């Protein structure tokens, strides 16, 4: 499995400009029209992933930006909505480091539009939680992760499997995001992609995510106290995602970004053994 595409300097600038255009296009938009922008961008991302000649032409920095915009409007003008098309015009007239990074940029814009639609519908909390919990389910089953991550696997088959994993009560935005992820992983494993999506949802809410492993199930009140404590420590709102890990014996292991706070009995015993060995 290849690693996820990293945007280089030129592509980061191009993505920033396209993201700004996306926000402008979505200003005041709600409902089906808003959701449709994300769906259109996702469909274009998948198309570019399949059509190598088209993505090379749209990312060709040697051609005139006006020519690239004319090409994207000619090819896609009757297939997607005007707002998504305007965002793509900004995408293709910018300079990207590679065709692959242009496709990755369009995919991320699709995610952004879908998360904005969930946010404006007051469902972003639900989407974030569903993405996190699905990620934990997949992470606990390596064979399932491998199946969903296989770039040679049937996209339709993976989408069917995802629909079986998600309940009928799952948010439509969650389903759309996960279907896009498994259809076009962009070098991500399914677990990595789900973690990235959950983090993107949390970021939209201007929060950090604390991944908490606990020896026992935490009550709602305990989770709320822990979130409040971490928010004070990090001076910003922190979302708490918990999972039970009996191997910890007792206590918690908390990870916020690259920082790990090990307050588990197993962690203290391991530290004591290291001190005795030293």
Image (cartoon, helix red, strand yellow):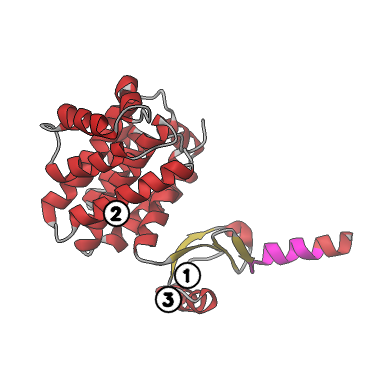
User: Marks 2/3: CA distance?
Assistant: 34 Å
Residue 40 point in image, percent of width and height: 20, 39
- Residue contact at pointers 2 and 3, CB within 8 angstroms: no
User: Marks 1/2: CA distance?
Assistant: 40 Å
Query: Would you place residue 252 above or below residue 49 in this image?
Result: below
Which quarter of the figure has residue 64? top left
Sequence-first tag of 2 and 3:
2
Magenta span of residues = 262-272
Q: Is residue 108 at least partly visible in the picture?
A: yes
Identify the element where label 2 is drawn: helix
Residue bearing mark 1: 218
Which disc is residue 20 wearing?
2
User: Marks 1/3: CA distance?
Assistant: 10 Å
Residue bearing mark 3: 224
**Residue at figure coordinates x 32%, y 27% from the top left:** 63
Which residue is nearer to you in this view: 261 or 55?
Answer: 55
Sequence-first tag of 1 and 2:
2
Q: Residues within 10 Å of mark 2 (few under 14, many from 20)?
A: few
Identify the element where label 3 is drawn: helix
Q: On the rendered image, what quadrant is the C terminus found in?
A: bottom right
Identify the element where label 1 is drawn: loop
**Residue at figure coordinates x 13%, y 32% from the top left:** 79
**Residue at figure coordinates x 48%, y 34% from the top left:** 143
Q: Nearer the viewer, mark 2 or mark 3?
A: 2
Which residue is nearer to you in this view: 10 or 254?
Answer: 10
Q: Nearer the viewer, mark 1 or mark 2?
A: 2
Sequence-first tag of 1 and 3:
1
Q: Residues within 10 Å of mark 1 (few under 14, many from 20)?
A: some
Q: Assign the magenta stretch its main secondary structure.
A: helix
Q: Is residue 170 at least partly visible in the picture?
A: no
């Amino acid at each position: 499995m290849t690693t996820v595409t990293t945007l280089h300097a030129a592509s980061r600038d191009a993505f920033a400009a396209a993201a700004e255009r996306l926000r402008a296009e979505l200003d005041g938009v709600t409902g089906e029209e808003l959701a449709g922008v994300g769906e259109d961008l996702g469909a274009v991302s998948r198309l570019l992933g399949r059509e190598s000649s088209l993505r090379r032409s749209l990312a060709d920095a040697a051609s005139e930006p006006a020519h690239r915009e004319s090409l994207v409007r000619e090819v896609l003008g009757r297939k997607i909505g005007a707002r998504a098309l305007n965002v793509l015009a900004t995408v293709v007239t910018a300079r990207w480091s590679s065709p692959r990074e242009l496709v990755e940029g369009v995919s991320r814009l699709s995610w952004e539009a879908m998360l904005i639609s969930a946010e404006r519908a007051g469902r972003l909390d639900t989407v974030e939680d569903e993405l996190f919990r699905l990620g934990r389910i997949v992470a606990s089953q390596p064979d399932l992760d491998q199946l969903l991550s296989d770039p040679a696997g049937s996209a339709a088959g993976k989408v069917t499997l995802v629909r079986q994993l998600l309940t009928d009560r799952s948010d439509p935005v969650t389903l759309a995001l996960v279907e896009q992820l498994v259809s076009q992983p962009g070098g991500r494993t399914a677990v990595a992609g789900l973690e990235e999506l959950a983090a993107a949802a949390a970021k939209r809410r201007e929060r950090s995510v604390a991944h908490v492993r606990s020896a026992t199930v935490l009550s709602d009140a305990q989770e709320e106290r822990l979130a409040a404590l971490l928010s004070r420590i990090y001076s910003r709102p922190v979302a708490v995602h918990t999972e039970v890990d009996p191997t910890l014996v007792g206590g918690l292991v908390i990870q916020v970004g690259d920082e790990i706070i090990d307050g588990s009995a197993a962690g203290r015993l391991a530290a004591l053994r290291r001190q005795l060995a030293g």
